[in-house]
Amino acid sequence: MTRESLREAVCARGVIAIVRLHDASKLVPAAEALYAGGIRVIEFTLNSPGALNAITSSRHALPKAIIGAGTVRSADDAKAATDAGAQIIVAPDTKPEVIEATHAGQAAAIPGAYTPTEIAAAMDFGADLVKLFPAKGLGPGYVREVLAPLDDARLVPTGGVSVDNVTAYFAAGAAAVAVGGSLVNNALADAGDFDAVTANARAIQEAVDAAHGKGT
């Protein structure tokens, strides 16, 4: 897929599931559980042991999903992730060299930003989408205010997004959202409760689809 098609696919699905776990053996089962619940965009954070292997394995196990890497903080990390098969590269901050390495690896870049100045800089550096992080203390109203002058920004609020507020984020103009611990976490993975992960995934994807006007 091209960067443009990846960006449009992420926006069409509306939600990126973030997988951050301390047990490498649970990463791919978690991704499979998320996929079973309807999630089609999955990000493995690089501060999870075995994340690169999980990216490669999930590309094979879930060929219709978009698999990415998160917590990417250097150009070397971006290259390692794209070499492993990552299709999107998500970062907590904005570094031009990370975006350049991401694009060199034919992946879509989703750097993190917080203020209007940071968001505009990320866009100037070539971001395909911009991760609004941490969004928990900002809320949907902030998205609406930022998009008034920066109406071409494609924001992905991350942090504190849930079934309860996802509709408000899309109404405010978010391009997509990213959800982590409320979908899958160490407690669920360690307990092997992947049915709960699937149920959580189904609930958030249905909420996103409804916000998009797709129904369930």
Image: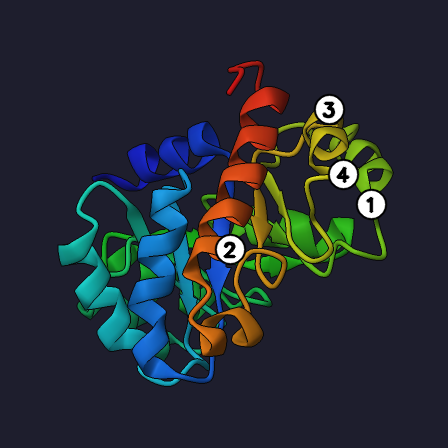
Secondary structure beneath dot 1 equals loop
* Disc number lying in front (2 or 1): 2
Secondary structure beneath dot 2 equals helix
Percent of width and height locating residue 44: 40, 66
Q: Does the image show residue 198?
A: yes
Where does label 3 land, which residue?
Answer: 171
Using the image, tell me which numbered label, if any, was put on residue 139.
1
Q: Are marks 1 and 4 in contact (CB under 8 Å)?
A: yes
Percent of width and height locating residue 72: 45, 72
> Closest to the observer: 198 or 10?
198
* Disc number lying in front (3 or 2): 2
* Disc number lying in front (4 or 2): 2
Instruction: Work out how far the residue at label 4 is from the one at label 2, CA to CA, in angstroms.
Output: 20 Å
Where does label 4 land, which residue?
Answer: 165
> Mark 3 or 4 closer to N-term?
4
What's the residue type where badge 2 is placed? Ala
Instruction: Work out how far the residue at label 3 is from the one at label 2, CA to CA, in angstroms.
Output: 28 Å
Instruction: Work out how far the residue at label 3 is from the one at label 4, CA to CA, in angstroms.
Output: 10 Å
Where does label 2 land, which residue?
Answer: 196
User: Which image quarter: residue 5?
Assistant: top left
What's the residue type where badge 1 is placed? Gly
Percent of width and height locating residue 168: 77, 31
Secondary structure beneath dot 4 equals loop
Instruction: Work out how far the residue at label 2 is from the one at label 1, CA to CA, in angstroms.
Output: 27 Å
Q: Report crowding for label 3: few under 14, some 14 to 19, many 20 or more residues within 10 A (C-alpha).
A: some
Residue at the spot 45% in from the left edge and 49% down from the top edge: 198
Secondary structure beneath dot 3 equals helix
> Closest to the observer: 168 or 153?
168
> Mark 4 or 2 closer to N-term?
4
Q: Are marks 4 and 2 in contact (CB under 8 Å)?
A: no
